[in-house]
Amino acid sequence: MMLNVAAVHGPKAPSSGNSLITNKLPAPSTTIIPKAETIASQFSFAYIEPDQYYIASDVLHLLPMEFVDKHSVIPLDRFDDTLVIVVAGPLEDEVLQEIEQLTGCTVQIFVSTVSEVRKAVETLKQGQRRAAARRETYGG
């Protein structure tokens, strides 16, 4: 069964975590999105724009940032033992198995454009660096 995150939470649903993307990012090209949506539907995956959702901090911490960066995969939400992720392209079986091992969850995949996923990963990395700097400055 395909989870429809938008149907469950809707865009910009409040969360216990931090926002995934700030409003400072430019909108993706109007020609790229329809192409990405078409490709997603051809492979029976739902298309999602990661900047439209918040990620709870407990979900974000399910995968190490190095893993997220290396594989361009974003943990978006968790429903019981199902982890919803966003990717920009196909995942190798080994990567999918590693996600399941790391999280203890089955994985539900959504797709987005490469540029959207990379921007989201960069924003997440910046947030992690800021948090580390705060911990260093203020302790904890």
Image (cartoon, helix red, strand yellow):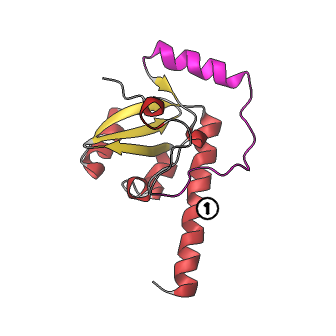
On the image, the x and y values in percent for residue 124 come to 56, 56
Badge 1 amino acid? Gln
In this rendering, the answer to whether 20 lies above or below 92 is below
- Front one among 101 and 41: 41
Q: Does the magenta stretch include residue 110?
A: no
**Residue situated in front as seen by the camera: 83 or 117:** 83
**Does dot 1 land on a helix, a strand or a loop?**
helix
Name the quadrant of the C terminus: bottom left
Taking 125 as reference, is 108 left or right?
A: left
Q: Where is residue 59 in the image (x, y as percent from the top left)?
A: 39, 52
Q: Is residue 2 above or below residue 42?
A: below
Residue range highlighted in magenta: 17-44
Q: Give the answer, above or below, for where 19 lies relative to 95.
A: below
User: Which secondary structure is most common in the magenta stretch?
Assistant: loop
Is residue 102 shown left or right of residue 34? left
Q: Total of numbered circles in the picture?
A: 1
- Give the quadrant of the N terminus: top left
Q: Please name the residue shown 61% across and 49% down the image.
A: 21
The quadrant in which residue 137 appears is bottom right
List x then y, in percent, for residue 138. Answer: 55, 86
Which residue is disc 1 drawn over?
126
Whole-percent x, y for residue 5 in the image:
44, 33
Based on the picture, tell me whether residue 33 belongs to the magenta stretch.
yes
Q: Residue furthest top?
A: 42
**Crowding at label 1, few (<14), some or many (≥20) Cα neighbours within 10 Å?**
few
Residue, x 48% and y 13% (percent of image)? 42
